[in-house]
Image (cartoon, grey):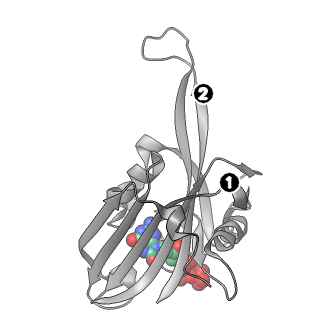
Amino acid sequence: MTETTLCFPLRSRDVDGGAAGDGEPTGTDEVLLIEKRRGLGAGWYNGPGGKLEAGETPRECAVRETREEVGLEVDPAALEKAGELEFVLDGTEHTFCHVYRTRSFAGEPTASEEARPEWIPVGEVPYDRMWDDDYLWLPGVLEGRTVAGEFRFEGGTPLDEADFVDHDLEWDVDLEANSDDRNP
Ligand SMILES: Nc1nc2c([nH]c(=O)n2[C@H]2C[C@H](O)[C@@H](COP(=O)(O)OP(=O)(O)OP(=O)(O)O)O2)c(=O)[nH]1
């Protein structure tokens, strides 16, 4: 079983010209996604993230991966735990993923060998170019909700070539109580 993280940085954008065309600013939320260039899920959009290193907490991992992949410095204390997702492959737990969101970060996203970053309005997230389960949980996470989910895949490794077959989801769970961390 691999323990991983995902981090979804969010920002508000003021856009001129509301529906009424009265020039009133309208807020729209954007999320920083990456187009993953290599490894598991290459070619698909996702949040920055990756595998925990030895001795690292999930929160530390989310901060490090976001820095390494897109050069954004997120504030660990302000990372909000948004989800805990289990990916099961052929009946065996394959990956446990800690999901975070944040509005507190510094710097400008920059492309790396691993990732091409892109700010995308939350209503325009390209679910057809993401993992097959993401449309089930990411919209709620981007709205500020918390989720615990199990997603079952079949068809052997690698996980990103297996078929997504079914899932269980629980919303508005108390993740802080579970704590950051299955890591001792
Ligand atoms: N959004 C989303 N992310 C997923 C799903 N399944 C899954 O493993 N992930 C995440 C967990 C990890 O953050 C990421 C896997 O990337 P990774 O960075 O660990 O894998 P990699 O092979 O590129 O690893 P590395 O060589 O860079 O260490 O994908 C899914 O169904 N949806």
The crowding category of the residue bearing disc 1, from other C-alpha atoms within 10 Å (few below 14, some 14 to 19, many at least 20), is few
Which residue is at a point 67% across and 65% down the rendered structure image?
Answer: 66
How far is the residue under mark 1 from the one under mark 2? 23 Å
Q: Are marks 1 and 2 in contact (CB under 8 Å)?
A: no
Q: Position of residue 117 (x, y in %)?
A: 61, 57
Q: Is residue 41 visible in this depiction of the protein?
A: no
Q: Which mark is residue 159?
A: none
Closer to us: 41 or 77:
77
| Left or right: residue 10 compared with residue 156 | right
Above or below, 20 against 43 in this view is above
Look at label 2 and name its amino acid. Asp
Quarter occupied by residue 34: bottom right
Which residue is at a point 26% across and 70% down the rendered structure image?
Answer: 167
Kind of element beneath mark 2: strand
Q: Position of residue 163 (x, y in %)?
A: 26, 78
Look at label 1 and name its amino acid. Ala
Q: Which mark is residue 78?
A: 1
Kind of element beneath mark 1: helix
Q: Position of residue 74 (x, y in %)?
A: 71, 57
The crowding category of the residue bearing disc 2, from other C-alpha atoms within 10 Å (few below 14, some 14 to 19, many at least 20), is few
Q: Which residue is mark 2?
A: 14
Q: Which quarter of the rendered picture does the C terminus lie within?
A: bottom right
| Left or right: residue 48 compared with residue 142 | right
Closer to us: 143 or 160:
143
Which residue is at a point 39% across and 50% down the rendered structure image?
Answer: 139
Q: Is residue 68 visible in this depiction of the protein?
A: yes
Above or below, 85 against 71 in this view is below
Which residue is at a point 46% across and 63% down the rendered structure image?
Answer: 83
**Mark with earlier residue (1, 2):** 2
